[in-house]
Image (cartoon, rainbow, N blue to C red):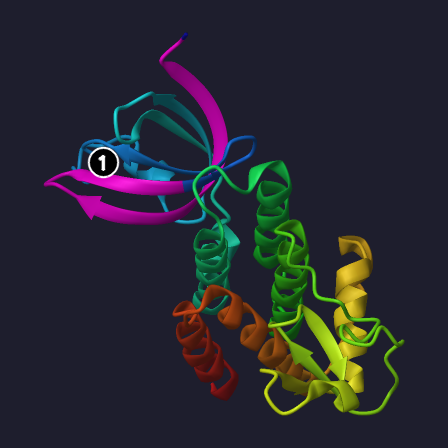
């Protein structure tokens, strides 16, 4: 069996190792998440270094290794230069990369995850409107959860099965979706969800990207959607999404300027 292979992927994470090497985590189109070692990539003379920047879409040649596979060649397919030229947009890219990396184990992700991640990076790269970009991020979160088997139930009460009405409802990651007020009880970990936010989440869950790109929502509704999804995601991860603070700081500063 050959000890070398080619792959296509997007750079999710990098960390230094040794004097000149770097561990690079990729989301590969067909192999899912993979962490490999790029030897000598921190040297000024390295030809691989510019192609292994965070969020780059790359073509790789790798060799099988004992602990980590080894990146022998890397060629950039798409660097998303517009995204990287703007601090707010690149902060959203880092946020997507963190979520993807934290949820996936080695070998998980595959084609669906790769194409979803690449699609949203491309949309952000071409979009200047911050509220639109935020909506793309929320759509990614909803569709990514579904791809992982964590699709939240948004139409019926998870506990009683009744179709959800316009009255008070709560989103709970503990039970995997929305519950009516009468079914919540006193101990369920849940957060209130407004009717408009629930309708928006259903839309993002069901519609394709062409339709989502035509949707316009207010800044206030965008903020509500962000809040309930962050609550849901962080409960599943059992940890804070660190890059969210950076996003809020950068975007807040840009909105004030």
Q: At 76% across and 62% down in the image, what residue appears?
A: 205
Q: Is residue 129 left or right of residue 32?
A: right
57 vs 185, nearest the viewer: 185
The residue under label 1 is: 41
Badge count: 1
Q: Quadrant of the N terminus?
A: top left
Which quarter of the picture shows residue 22?
A: top left
Residue 39 in view here: yes
Residue 24 lies in magenta, yes or no?
Answer: yes
Q: Is residue 129 left or right of residue 5?
A: right
81 vs 220, nearest the viewer: 220
Asked if residue 81 is positioned above or below residue 153 in the image, the reply reads above
Q: Main secondary structure of the magenta part?
A: strand
Residue that protrudes farthest toward the left in the picture: 19
The x, y position of residue 111, in whole percent, is: 61, 36
The x, y position of residue 7, in whole percent, is: 48, 26
The x, y position of residue 237, in whole percent, is: 47, 64
Asked if residue 60 is positioned above or below residue 17 in the image, the reply reads above
Residue 23 lies in magenta, yes or no?
Answer: yes
57 vs 16, nearest the viewer: 16
Report helix, strand or loop for mark 1: loop
Q: At 36% across and 49% down in the image, what residue appears?
A: 13
The x, y position of residue 177, in whole percent, is: 70, 71
Which quarter of the picture shows residue 172?
A: bottom right
183 vs 123, nearest the viewer: 183
Q: At 37% across and 43% down in the image, what residue appears?
A: 25
Which quarter of the picture shows residue 20?
A: top left
Asked if residue 145 is positioned above or below residue 241 in the image, the reply reads above
Give the magenta-colored segment's residue range. 2-25
Q: Is residue 105 left or right of residue 24?
A: right
């Amino acid at each position: 069996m050959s000890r070398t292979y080619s792959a296509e992927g997007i750079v999710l994470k990098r960390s230094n190792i040794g004097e000149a090497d770097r561990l690079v985590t990729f989301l590969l189109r067909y192999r899912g998440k993979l962490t490999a070692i790029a030897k000598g990539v921190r040297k000024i003379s390295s030809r691989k270094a510019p192609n292994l920047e965070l969020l780059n879409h790359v073509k790789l040649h790798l060799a099988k290794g004992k602990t980590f596979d080894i990146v022998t060649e890397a060629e950039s397919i798409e660097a998303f230069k517009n995204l990287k030229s703007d601090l707010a947009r690149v902060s959203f890219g880092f946020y997507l990369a963190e979520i993807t990396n934290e949820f996936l184990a080695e070998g998980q992700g595959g084609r669906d995850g790769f194409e979803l991640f690449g699609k949203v990076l491309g949309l952000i790269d071409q979009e200047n409107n911050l509220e639109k970009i935020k909506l793309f991020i929320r759509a990614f979160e909803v569709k990514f959860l579904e791809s992982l088997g964590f699709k939240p139930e948004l139409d019926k009460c998870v506990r009683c099965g009744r179709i959800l009405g316009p009255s008070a409802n709560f989103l709970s990651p503990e039970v995997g979706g929305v519950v009516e007020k009468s079914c919540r009880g006193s101990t369920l970990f849940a957060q209130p969800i407004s009717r408009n936010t629930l309708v928006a989440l259903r839309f993002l869950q069901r519609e394709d990207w062409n339709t989502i790109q035509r949707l316009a929502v207010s800044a206030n509704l965008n903020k509500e959607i962000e809040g309930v999804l962050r609550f849901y995601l962080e409960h599943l991860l059992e940890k804070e999404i660190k890059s969210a603070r950076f996003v809020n700081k950068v975007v807040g500063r840009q909105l004030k300027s």
